[in-house]
Amino acid sequence: MATLRDIRRRIRSVEGTQKITRAMKLVAAVKLRRAQERILEARPYAHKMREVLSSLALRSDPERHPLLTRRETGKKLLVVISADRGLCGAFNSNVIRRSLETFRGMKQVAFSIMTIGRKVRESYRRRRDAFQIRSEYAGFFDRLAYEHAAEIGGELVKAYVEEDYDEILLVYNEFKSPTVQRVQVERLLPIEPMPLPPELAPVGFIYEPSPEMVLERLLPKHVETQVYRALMESLAAEYGARMTAMDAATKNAQDMIERLTIQYNKARQERITKELMDIVGGAEALRSARA
């Protein structure tokens, strides 16, 4: 049975842990507020960019630019985005599990992996025999900037133009609310044409200066923009998941402190009762000896 000293030591330990989880929750809440503002500002631009490029893809000859060209090589690239750190609930495990499900759903396809974030990098390094890792990015989420998305997007554009893959997919956590994150699997390349009802014919555009120049400038920019949006979505979702996880850990620590306090009081009461019984027993023994 645990002694009073052991119980007091456990209570102090849990109280120390509770202080840490409460501080981590507050830090995550502050970072979440900034990340949420950034993603809410970036979403309209990214969505409008996708809409414009989908419209251009519908009205353009796929042969005018490699990023519009569809081909069947049987090779796909999966870009999986996770966090650099843990302590954020099921945030990392959900996105890794979804990427593995994507692999299993396309058994006849050769997949390569681009990992973004330390957690997904560590997970797929342990599976290196089963998956080919093309490249790894990590350690920049605390200072996330558009330059990081431009570097990643440039590599993806280069890989698709050089016909290394016939499809590039993004797997990431989309930010819905501080308590809700949803894993998304999106096609990044080739660029999907806008769906059009069969009874309507696409209206042609007049390009200035030329279709080739417009597509050459806009299509790589679109890839960078969508990668940047996915990175910011993942970052905001990570902070929301960490804030929620630390809030739950703080509450669990409080429950444990209350249970340990009750256990401590019971043990202390039992000890006092035992000491009183020893005193009463000794007094009775002394009285009997005198008689």
Image (cartoon, helix red, strand yellow):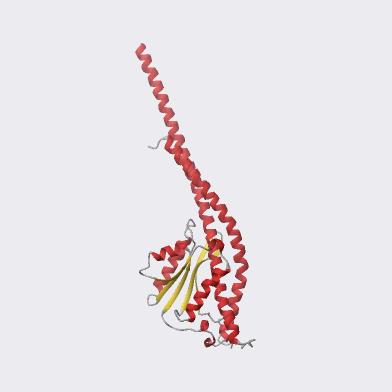
When the figure is inspected, residue 113 is found, relative to residue 90, above or below; the finding is below
Q: Indicate left or right for 36 with 260 as reference.
A: right
Of residue 278 and residue 146, the one placed in the foreground of this image is 146
Any part of residue 264 in sight: yes
Identify the residue at horizontal 42%, vertical 30% (top origin): 271
When the figure is inspected, residue 104 is found, relative to residue 118, above or below; the finding is below
Quadrant showing the C terminus: top left
Of residue 39 and residue 64, the one placed in the foreground of this image is 64
Q: Indicate left or right for 53 with 71 as reference.
A: right
In terms of image quadrants, where is residue 48?
A: bottom right
Give coordinates of residue 54: x percent, y percent.
Answer: 57, 80
Quadrant showing the N terminus: top left
Give coordinates of residue 157: x percent, y percent.
Answer: 51, 77
Figure disc tally: 0
Give coordinates of residue 100: x percent, y percent.
Answer: 41, 68
Any part of residue 196 in sight: no
Identify the residue at horizontal 51%, vertical 83% (top origin): 66
Identify the residue at horizontal 62%, vertical 72% (top origin): 45
